[in-house]
Image (cartoon, rainbow, N blue to C red):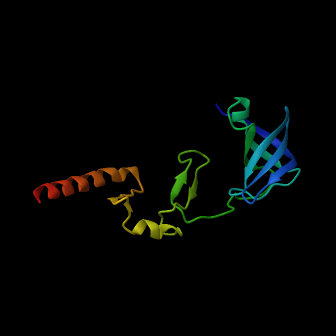
Amino acid sequence: MVFWGKGKVIQILEETGQSQVLKVQYSDGEGVAIHYLEFFPALQIGDQIWVNRTATFLQLGTGGYDYVLSILNHNENGVVKQTNGHIMKLRYTPLQFSVLSCEEQGSEYHHIFTKPRMLQGLPVMIGELHSMLPIVVTILRQLEKKVKKD
């Protein structure tokens, strides 16, 4: 079950480089919503928004926050920050988006994953996907056979 709501921004309570906390007027009263700037530009007082209100309706542990899904009175395509990432978050949902994961070649951290690593003298294997596990198990079994022969 999902509770959606149309609202109007009536106050900006807090703003960081990544998000805004907004006071929102709904048809049934006021609420507080979080707006992530990763997806849409900053909101202004008077903007009409579409909000996911499910957690507050169900009184879940979100701190009483709703979440902004879209800006209704802007003609925006919703792409604020484009990444070259290929990892999908919230995949198979209407809200899926891509991120640049640390092990991808375009990441500033990729070099960390290209070097052999040890953890207290033990080798560490890093697999980007859970489907790599059968390959790792096969390699370990081959290495085990080799060690037993020696």
Residue 85, percent from left and from top: 54, 62
Depicted 39 relative to depicted 104: above or below: above
- Residue shown at 29% from the left, 54% from the top: 135
Quadrant in which the N terminus appears: top right
**Residue 121 relative to residue 104: left or right:** left
Q: Quadrant of residue 8?
A: top right
Q: Quadrant of residue 39?
A: bottom right
Depicted 6 relative to depicted 117: above or below: above
Depicted 62 relative to depicted 87: above or below: above
- Residue shown at 67% from the left, 60% from the top: 79
- Residue shown at 88% from the left, 51% from the top: 45
Residue 129, percent from left and from top: 41, 53
- Residue shown at 82% from the left, 51% from the top: 14
Residue 34, percent from left and from top: 75, 47
Q: Residue furthest left?
A: 149
Q: Residue furthest top?
A: 58
Residue 11, percent from left and from top: 88, 48
Quadrant in which the C terminus appears: bottom left
